[in-house]
Amino acid sequence: MFIIANSFLGIFLLLLAYTYIDKLEKIGCACAESKYKKFIKNFALFAVVYLFVTMLVPPSKTVEFLGVAGALAFKVVNLVFYILSFVFFVVSIIYVRGLMTEKCKCSEDIRREILYIYSIVEVIMLSLNIVFGVLLFLVSGTVGLAMATINNIEKGGPNIRETVRNPIKSLKRVPKDFKNVAKSLKRTLRK
């Protein structure tokens, strides 16, 4: 339910951005001309369609509907959409700030301020998603490494005690341990 409500909010705000740019084109606002305007308008329309389709087809059903290859393609399209969304919101911020800086009178509209605030919030949210994703990856990898290290120490506990008590005897085991490591490595490489 949250995803659907969030999608509707996103669709509504993107339609506001589209209608705002469309209004600027219709009234012939010369100071609103920019290389970014066409991208903002086209992407807003594409994003509305994309959000509507993804709202109807939940990600959990993509394998069922599209098969494994289709689900993988959907994931790739999703990644591209997120990257383009980030670019869209950054470009929107640049475009609106330019209009504000130039004091473009014909561009004044509540939708301009909504687009500006919405873009800033989305850039922050997307950036946090990336940062938290990387942090989660790093933390889970660190925890996994720590757990594996603890398991290895527990398994090697008797050897460690023996090495501390009798280092000469432990030195005699080094060639045998090298052979065991080499055998283990060969088994791993065969898999």
Image (spheres, helix red, strand yellow):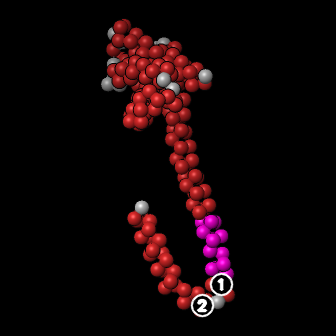
* Residues at marks 1 and 2 touching, judged by CB atoms closer than 8 Å: yes
Q: Is residue 159 magenta?
A: yes
- The residue at the point 59 percent across, 92 percent down is 168
Q: Which mark is residue 169?
A: 2
94, above or below 136, in the image: above
- The residue at the point 48 percent across, 80 percent down is 178
Please say whether residue 5 is visible from this viewpoint. yes
Residue 151 spot, x, y in % from top left: 62, 66
Q: Would you name the residue on which mark 1 appears?
A: 162
Please say whether residue 44 is visible from this viewpoint. no
* Amino acid marked by disc 2: Lys
Residue 104 spot, x, y in % from top left: 41, 17
Most frequent secondary structure within the magenta stretch: helix
Q: Is residue 91 magenta?
A: no
In front here: 92 or 6? Answer: 6
Residue 156 spot, x, y in % from top left: 62, 74
Q: Quadrant of the C terminus?
A: bottom left
Label 2 Cα neighbours within 10 Å, binned few <14 / some 14-19 / many ≥20 = few
Look at the numbered disc 2 and give the secondary structure of its residue. Answer: helix
Label 1 Cα neighbours within 10 Å, binned few <14 / some 14-19 / many ≥20 = few
Residue 144 spot, x, y in % from top left: 58, 57
- The residue at the point 44 percent across, 68 percent down is 187
Residues rendered magenta in the picture: 149-161
- The residue at the point 54 percent across, 34 percent down is 125
Q: Residue furthest left?
A: 35
Q: Quadrant of residue 166?
A: bottom right
In front here: 120 or 159? Answer: 159
Look at the numbered disc 1 and give the secondary structure of its residue. Answer: helix
Q: Quadrant of residue 94?
A: top left
170 relative position to 97: left or right? right
